[in-house]
Amino acid sequence: MFDLSGKTIVVTGGGQGIGRGIVQSVAEAGADVVVAGRTAATLEESAAAAREHGVQAWPLVSDITRPGDIDRIVAAALEHNGRIDCWVNNAGSARNEDVGPLIDTREDQWDAVVDLNLKWTFFCCQAAARVMRDQGGGGSIINISSRSGSQPCPMTGQYGAAKAGVENLTATMAVEWGHHGIRVNAVAPGVVATPEHLESGSMQTEGRRRRQIESVPLRRLGRVEDIGPLCVFLASDESSWITGDVIQVTGGSRIPVGYLTYMYRVTQQLAENEASPNGDQQGAEQPA
């Protein structure tokens, strides 16, 4: 079961984190893979590890926010194996400088996050679908969303909005492209402790990790190895009657820690405002 031998799979953002885990999982299942992303060194490392499973893997330095680079990804897959059986849209993020309350969000902060996570994800889907339609036999498109797409996302509201858009588009594309045999699904991870987050991102502090774990019924953070196997299933023939779905991979967590943290800080600031001589109410809008 879940044998991907003979299939060609594209993974964007495949050089590190969840994307690298997906590359390794599909390679272990027998797929050849185009590993697309921005950083040559990490792409080559990911591709080299994939080749250890006896498959072909081609690193391709590319940026999906450049239309010509999407065309290059398509061309690379077709040049090497003549078809695209599955396309995984993993590329996406929110920069530290784009984090903040929505009331203060600038247009450039909105565009940077929404364009990467929604606009260019769609155009990758479109490019993949056109190939799958023209080659015959259909294919599988997998969009990596986030639990932020279905839950409040304070301090990164534009990221949550973009992921919600991805999930809605996933359902619509599944309907429009189903008669071509193209399946479109989304995977929505919870908090995954990637090496990058543990080294320099939001998970580097013990207190932050502990608060996250306390909100997860299975009592641990996600690992990159938790996401790849689901993508293998969705890329395989065994999932041939599944489309338009969003599958949560969260360890059972239903309440985002960011929400709880935000409300705690608002409560603190309101209490401080009440205790202050001037009763300043401005701080409640912008928790530290």
Image: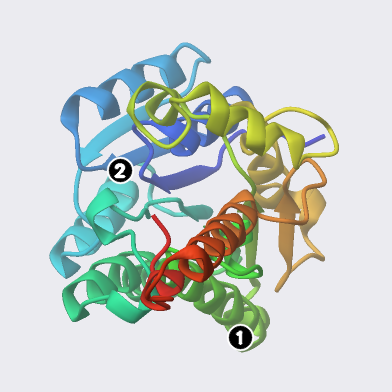
> What residue is shown at x 55% (from left), y 42% (from top)?
7
- Counting from the top left corner in percent of width and height, residue 194 is at 48, 29
Can you say which quadrant of the picture contains the C terminus? Answer: bottom left
Q: Nearer the viewer, residue 266 or 156?
A: 266
Q: Quadrant of residue 282?
A: bottom left
Question: Which residue in the structure is indicated by mark 2?
Answer: 36
The mark nearer the N terminus, 2 or 1, is 2
> What residue is shown at x 18% (from left), y 58% (from top)?
69
The three-letter amino acid code for the residue at tag 2 is Ala
- Counting from the top left corner in percent of width and height, residue 83 is at 43, 54
**Within-10-Å neighbours for mark 2: few <14, some 14–19, many 20+:** many
Viewer can see residue 222: no
Image: 254 above or below 286: above
Residue 235 located left or right of residue 60: right
Q: Nearer the viewer, residue 218 or 6?
A: 218
Question: Which mark is on residue 172?
Answer: 1
Can you say which quadrant of the picture contains the N terminus? Answer: top right
- Counting from the top left corner in percent of width and height, residue 262 is at 54, 59
Gap in angstroms between the C-alphas marked 2 and 1: 25 Å
The three-letter amino acid code for the residue at tag 1 is Thr
Question: Which mark is on residue 280?
Answer: none
> What residue is shown at x 27% (from left), y 43% (from top)?
37
Local secondary structure at mark 2: strand
